[in-house]
Amino acid sequence: MDGWWQQVVDTVISEFSDLPNITEVTRITLRLLMAATLGGMLGFEREQRGKAAGMRTHMLVALGAALFVLIPQQAGISDADLTRIIQGVVVGVGFLGAGTILKSTNEETIKGLTTAAGLWLTAAIGIAAGLGREASAVLSTVLALIIFYLMPKFSGGSDRT
């Protein structure tokens, strides 16, 4: 029985070997929390304005984008292969954003473009956080919040998208 139980324990330990030490656990946790938090900040703004994609959506997009680049980095993927993964994330989030865009048939208005662009930017911020570019991710989030909050005041109307 000891031999069987030891094999189970060894298998479980080997399955969690992608986080070999506290340094890696801290690094991964920080990057993922940073992505989710920054995405949540953008999503909170969108939610406050009653837009289709709110805080949870933005958090999941940022967290997913960070994870898509973080895991291949851990696996030792080449930079060229990582760029293909990033391309896939960008395209995939573009399709997600397209789902937030609505064209009214009785009016000539399109709604959701700003939310779609925000989701796209949220993915980019998640990628930056996942790559360990936290300062760039924070700066991009601050600039996005400035755009979300201040630009409608300068454009002379409400933010319809």
Image: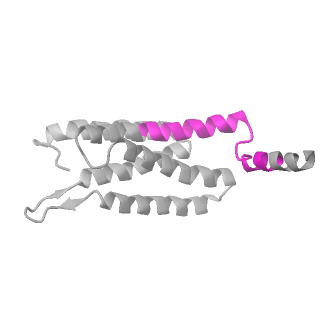
Q: Is residue 147 visible?
A: no
Residue 45 horizontal side relative to residue 13, left or right? left
Task: Judge whether 64 appears above or below 32 on screen.
Answer: below
The main secondary structure of the magenta stretch is helix
Residue 22, picture quadrant: top right
Q: What stretch is highlighted in magenta?
A: 10-38
Q: Residue at x 71, y 47 (%)?
A: 18
* Left or right of 1 on screen, residue 63: left
Q: Is residue 133 visible?
A: yes
Please determine whether, in this image, residue 70 is positioned above or below residue 153.
below
Please state if 150 lies on the left or on the right of 143 as rendered.
Answer: left
Instruction: Determine whether 138 is above or below 82 in the image.
Output: above
Rendered residue at 17%/59% (across/down):
110
Q: Is residue 74 above or below residue 147?
A: below
Residue drawn at (79%, 50%), measured in percent from left and top? 11
Which residue does the image show at 20% across and 50% down from the upper left? 161
Outermost residue to the bottom: 105
* Relative image position of residue 137 (x, y in whole percent): 45, 40
Q: Residue furthest left?
A: 106
Q: In this view, does 115 lie to the left or right of 93?
A: left
- Residue 160 or residue 135, whichever sits in front: 160
Q: Which of 120 and 10 is in front in this view?
A: 10
Is 130 magenta? The answer is: no
Q: How many labels does the image show?
A: 0
Q: Position of residue 69 (x, y in %)?
A: 56, 52
Q: Where does the image place residue 94, in percent across and percent down from the top left?
A: 37, 60
